[in-house]
Amino acid sequence: MLRGLSIKNFALIEQLQVSFDTGLITITGETGAGKSLFLGALGLLLGKRADLSSVKDNSQKCIIEGTFGIKQYDLVSFFDNEELDYEDETIIRREILPSGKSRAFINDTPVTLQSLSNLGIRLIDIHSQHQTLRVTTNDFQFEVLDALANVVREIESYKRGLKLLKEKEKEVSTLVANQESFTKEYDYNSFLLKELEDAKLKPDELSELEERYERLNNIEEIQERLSGSISIVSGEEIGVSDQLNTIKNNLSKIESYSGTLKELSERVQSIYIELDDIQTSLVDELDKLEADPKQLEEASLRLQLLHNLQVKHSATTIEELIALKEELQEKVSKTESLSEDIEKIKREIITIQSQLNEVAVRIHEKRKKALPKLVSELEDILKALGMPNASFKTSVTLGEGYLSNGKETLEFLFSANKGGTYGELKKIASGGELSRIMIAIKAILSRYAQLPTIIFDEIDTGVSGEIAHKMADLMMGMSKNLQVFSITHLPQIAANGQSHYKVYKEDINNITVTQLRLLNEEERVREIAEMIGGKDISDSALTHARSLLQIH
């Protein structure tokens, strides 16, 4: 509910600060006194765009601040999602700077206009004559019906299921598209994969293979040079081994004469041992060598195969070919398993649809049960509002398609006259009839849903007499469950307000300003008497005003 409103430097309002209570609050004043400014200021608080023309003094900023009690609205999750500090008593502030720029704050945190608007629609519903067209929309009609049917949980469940269904359908669509694309490449990928698999690739194979090929291809030279080396090492008298042995023996005989000689003797001994080992290895290597044209050919063919694969796939290493093979395996496997994946998701879709259908049927049954009650209550209220022959022809039909709030179509036809033709509200109902239908719907909704503060802006235009009393009674009934503002020209409604405010203009220092103030009992009597009989207040008008106010 709106607890307080502060307005500074806005249009004809220089400075205004006012508090509001619960219940029905009526606002009256002469035409042109500035009632629209009250709504304009609230509109800015609720996220409407501002411009510099709204500012009274362009050298100073315009500030509009509203204090709202929001504990009953269950808005903690909204504040969490918007990353705002939640307070049971929340302050919204809007500033228009002399530059024309606008700023918005919720509990002193800067916010975007979108965030402000998202919160605003949860706090205040401003309802004027031109907004009655909303009652003609199917979405609003479902909203009203669902409040009576108490299907909030079912619809939330349905919407979660519908979201999942759309995700799965999108997933299937993507897989089918991939399947078509992969299938075109499947044969080629399979051929490439088989070629790489047949090659039986091994990491580090290339270097080993190249070494084997070089050895086999140059075996005669290797044998010749190994034999020559062995001869040099082991040749009698002039062999390196014999000569080194002589040096070793010479040094061993004199090594005891000095440390240096001993070190030299040991070094030669090490060389002799190493040379002996080298000689053995040379002989072993020579013994292993054997010309093998078949192995040479196999190595050559293998190298050529690997080289061709590298060129074909622009690979520099065997490891890259192995990685390509694994990638092709995945593509081929994915193509082969896509049909299975698609069928699996299709089965999931059937399950989701079955669950959605069950929820949709529950929603339908509750709506079908609530619809006659809605029609009956609407017709009763409209009769009291001077539309004795108003009647509705309604039905909810369960269809096959999955819509945003169920699987139904709602027919909501209206006739204002006995024996008249039924038609859609937007085509057949007049502006005055739509206004009464809307207030009747709001009155019903107030008993079944937690509505925000509602402001009726001269919705009672064209109404008088007993109908005005009935409309006042409706507003009083609504005010038991929510805060209701009524900007009115009707004394019957003004008199029913638990709080009564007057909008008026006055000249201060030769400047006209708009004021809004709470009336005391005597001021209310005179205001309502003036509404009844004009500025020249008669005794009968005062008596009538006291009667409406139930003052004796």
Image: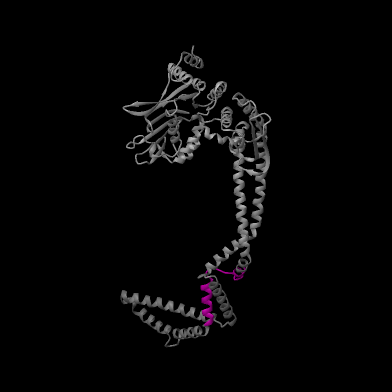
Residue 85 visible in the shown view: no
Residue 119 drawn at (x, y percent): 48, 36
The dominant secondary structure in magenta is helix
The front one of 531 and 195 is 531
Residue 414 drawn at (x, y percent): 64, 33
Residue 261 drawn at (x, y percent): 32, 77
Residue 212 part of the magenta-drawn span: yes
Please say which color scheme the image uses. one colour
Residue 118 visible in the shown view: yes
Residue found at the far top of this picture: 552
Q: How many marks?
A: 0
- Where 275 falls versus 425 (above or below)? below
The quarter holding residue 180 reads bottom right
Q: Tell whether 397 sits left or right of 196.
A: right
Residue 51 part of the magenta-drawn span: no
Q: Tell whether 426 sits left or right of 270.
A: right
- Where 431 falls versus 171 (above or below)? above
Residue found at the far bottom of this picture: 237
- Where 74 falls versus 263 (above or below)? above
Q: Tell whether 155 sits left or right of 52.
A: right
Residue 545 drawn at (x, y percent): 49, 16
Residue found at the far front of this picture: 536
Identify the residue at image location x=60%, y=25%: 386
**Magenta stretch bounds:** 194-217
